[in-house]
Amino acid sequence: MSYFVWGLIAVMIIAILLMLFRIQSLVSILRSSNEEVGTSNKVNGALMLIVPILGTIAGVWSFLEAKKHFLPEASSVHGKATDSLFWTTMTVITLMFVITNAVLFWFAYKYQYQKGRKVSFFHDNTRLEVFWTIVPAVIMAVLVFAGARVWSDTMMNEPKKGEAEIVEIMGKQFGWQVRYPGADKQLGKYNFRLIDDSAGNEFGIDFEDKNSEDDFVGTKMYIPVGKPVTLKIRARDVLHSVFLPHFRVKMDAVPGMPTHFSFTPTKTTVQMRQELGNNNFNYELACTEVCGKGHFAMRMIVEVVEQEEYEKWYAEQTPLLKDKPEFKGKGMGTLRKKNLAINENK
Ligand SMILES: [Cu+2]
């Protein structure tokens, strides 16, 4: 609300200044009809200095004010690389912006109309053209290649089989669900036709697949520190998007098109709490794709723990099949047979 009021006041002040300026220009035209340029020349000249100075002050203030809302230092290996790329790019473009705009405004001020001053004119300058084409091209190329390198390091260097912890994350309206592969470290197959919320198979797990027998599910995502984690991402209904801001992880969850993202956490939740001096801190997984009316609530707590603690927790979990023995051996084969029987009876 207060921002709105301040905005309104700013607009009104600008409107009043414009009116005064207009009145003054009209008066000066009436007063001295033979004078070539009125006071507007000087006013415009002064504004060319005042506006960029005020703009710079406002820009610096807004950056410092917003800084407290920035994300803390990245807690993943690739996150540190993307952050450093981001800040390098920001520094280069801010520097270029400041230099070019300072020159632009300064020239507009310095070379305002003055009686008797002659303009120097040249048609073109090849050296200057070459200089201002090559320098930005080289800078842009360096930034683009640095970006491509960070991207390929993050996305192309997949951890080898058995190297990463596999966690399946499934988005649905409205919540995240997480499945672990169990002792065999292999996720069982799934099929959307097997999804049955009322029976308790929200993932649509195919229990005819041996790999699914020890799969377990959770309400919280546990991951170990210092080891690659591969998220196998999917969606059950509409588009969702996995966002782990502290790890700088973002990947869409698309129905019918599984995606994945591998990253290595570098700080446990406890370490992060100590660093931030906040005992209530939790890593979180949020949805960043507006997916319906409950989108705002699509949040899951992520806990990063030491490797030993993770293994202990992992071993204590109960496979889904133990809680729901009625699913044993039920999967796509049984469903096909059932459908066949229905069709034959028609
Ligand atoms: Cu959403």
Image (tube, rainbow, N blue to C red):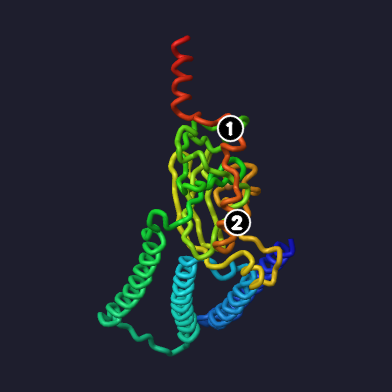
Residue ID at (70%, 68%): 278
Mark 1 Cα shell of 10 Å, populated few (<14), some (14-19), many (≥20): few
Would you name the residue on which mark 2 appears? 302
Which residue is at the front of the view, 119 or 71?
71
Q: Which mark is residue 73?
A: none
Specify the quadrant that holds the N terminus: bottom right
As drawn, is 327 to the left or to the right of 259? right
Q: Residue furthest left?
A: 126
As drawn, is 30 to the left or to the right of 329? right
Mark 2 Cα shell of 10 Å, populated few (<14), some (14-19), many (≥20): some
Q: Which mark is residue 325?
A: 1
Instruction: Give the residue type that dot 1 points to.
Output: Pro
Q: Is residue 267 above or below residue 108?
A: above
Residue ID at (45%, 37%): 210
Q: Is residue 197 above or below residue 54?
A: above
Which residue is at the front of the view, 25 or 183?
183
Whether residue 277 is visible here, answered yes or no, is yes
On whether ligand 1 comes within 8 Å of the CB at mark 1, the answer is: no
Cβ–Cβ below 8 Å for labels 1 and 2? no
Spot occupied by residue 142 in the image (x, y as percentages of width and height): 34, 73
Whether residue 19 is visible here, answered yes or no, is no
Instruction: Give the residue type that dot 2 points to.
Output: Val
Choose mark 1 or mark 2, whichever is in front: 1
Between the C-alphas of marks 1 and 2, the distance is 29 Å
On whether ligand 1 comes within 8 Å of the CB at mark 2, the answer is: no
Residue ID at (53%, 80%): 48
